[in-house]
Image (tube, helix red, strand yellow):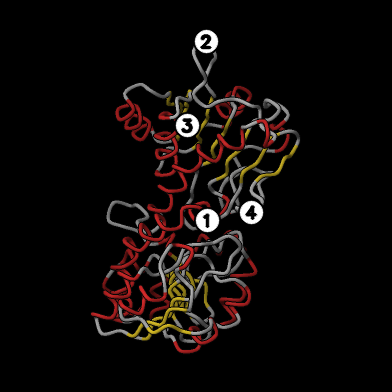
């Protein structure tokens, strides 16, 4: 199969869809890989690294899209990229369609087959291609939140760990999954007072065990959130409904109950955000203020540590990438129901029910799509 890896063009996105190691594996499987000139520069990979791995270096993005049967990316295709997609082409990347009707319409119109990293599953019910970036984003969240809390950035001027005689920052993490657990690990390590909310009692029990009482766990409810946020210096939104729009956990009226200069870090912004006042920002201009509360809502947080993120994502995606290239998407999905769960769009049809519900569009099942 002819595989193409273009350079990411979303603002401040430094990751790349394939590492040189992934290229080497694909070439060893008999596939032809074209990587756009400079595609890996943001993650510290040179064109020479890719060439030595067996890739052909494509001069332009147009060339990569035009000559490839499968496009491998990191972020959702931007409008100019969507215009380059064609019927019968396979797209393998993060999509996050539920909050993005424009992208959804364009992909449907293109006739492309699109498999989304974020909805591929595993035997334990997890999301193996989302998990590594969730780990990265979760670990970054307290770090960027602590920076936002600094007075020079408009925050409350509170040090995460405090000092002797002065209380540490109070951090509320809503969601105890991969993101929430990673965020808790770093926030606790920074010396903050941490409370994690979740709706799963077994998950809360697990967190209580692994943190040995160094944080507080609480069952998540609207009432619990309302009671806790007035005490918070930082709230980290870490709730995910796979493939669907994120639930709104804090509304604008509740901002008035919070301490002026407190910080909201919305890790769910790719799925529309879990705070009513959230809107996507970039690493170049990451924060804004609503009613005295600072919002950090960067939609590609892992892009800030592009080399680590690219390597972690590449490790997770490679087995699926090779299966798609070796067998073709239809046979690969037939052989692996977890990969089939990643099918979001095929030949003008939406194939993920949660996206259809979020956008009010009809959807067929992946099995129906495969039978077309």
Residue 284: numbered disc: 4
Residues 233 and 306: in front is: 306
Q: Residues within 10 Å of mark 1 (few under 14, many from 20)?
A: many
Q: Which residue is mark 2?
A: 165
- Name the outermost residue toward the bottom: 67
Return the disc, 1 or 3, that comes first in the chain's sequence: 3
Local secondary structure at mark 2:
loop
Q: Nearer the viewer, mark 1 or mark 3?
A: 3
Residues 187 and 346: in front is: 187
Q: Residue at coordinates 62% horizontally, 32% vertically from top-left?
A: 150
Marks 1,4: beta carbons within 8 A: no
Q: Which residue is mark 1?
A: 244
Residues 276 and 264: in front is: 264
Above or below for 128 versus 142: below
Local secondary structure at mark 3:
strand
Q: Nearer the viewer, mark 2 or mark 1?
A: 2
- Name the outermost residue toward the top: 165
Q: Residue at coordinates 44% horizontally, 43% vertically from top-left?
A: 179
């Amino acid at each position: 199969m002819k595989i193409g890896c273009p350079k990411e063009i979303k603002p401040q996105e430094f990751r790349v869809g394939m590492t040189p190691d992934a290229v080497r594996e694909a070439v060893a499987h008999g596939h032809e890989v074209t990587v756009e000139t400079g595609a890996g520069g943001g993650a510290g990979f040179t064109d020479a690294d890719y060439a030595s791995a067996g890739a052909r270096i494509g001069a332009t993005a147009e060339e990569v899209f035009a000559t490839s049967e499968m496009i491998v990316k990191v972020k959702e295709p931007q409008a100019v990229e969507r215009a380059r997609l064609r019927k019968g082409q396979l797209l393998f990347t993060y999509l996050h369609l539920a909050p993005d009707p424009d992208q959804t319409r364009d992909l449907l119109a293109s006739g492309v087959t699109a498999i989304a990293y974020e909805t591929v599953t595993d035997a334990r019910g997890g999301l193996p291609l989302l998990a590594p970036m969730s780990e990265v984003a979760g670990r970054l969240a307290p770090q960027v939140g602590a920076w936002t809390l600094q007075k020079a950035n408009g925050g409350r001027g509170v040090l995460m760990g405090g000092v002797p005689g002065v209380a540490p920052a109070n951090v509320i993490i809503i969601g105890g999954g991969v993101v929430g657990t990673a965020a808790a690990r770093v926030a606790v390590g920074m010396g903050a007072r941490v409370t994690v909310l979740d709706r799963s009692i077994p998950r809360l029990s697990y967190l209580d065990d692994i943190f040995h009482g160094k944080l507080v766990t609480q069952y998540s409810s609207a009432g619990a959130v309302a009671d806790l946020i007035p005490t918070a210096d930082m709230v980290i939104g870490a709730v995910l409904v796979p493939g669907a729009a994120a639930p709104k956990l804090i509304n604008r009226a509740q901002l008035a109950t919070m301490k002026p200069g407190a910080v909201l870090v919305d890790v769910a912004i790719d799925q529309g955000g879990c705070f009513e006042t959230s809107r996507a920002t970039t690493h170049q201009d990451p924060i804004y203020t609503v009613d005295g509360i600072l919002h950090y809502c960067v939609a590609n947080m892992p892009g800030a540590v592009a080399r680590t993120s690219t390597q972690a994502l590449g490790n997770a995606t490679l087995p699926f990438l090779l299966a798609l290239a070796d067998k073709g998407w239809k046979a690969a999905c037939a052989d692996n129901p977890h990969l089939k769960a990643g099918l979001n769009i095929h030949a003008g049809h939406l194939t993920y029910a949660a996206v259809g519900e979020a956008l009010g569009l009809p959807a067929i099942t992946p099995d129906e799509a495969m039978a077309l």
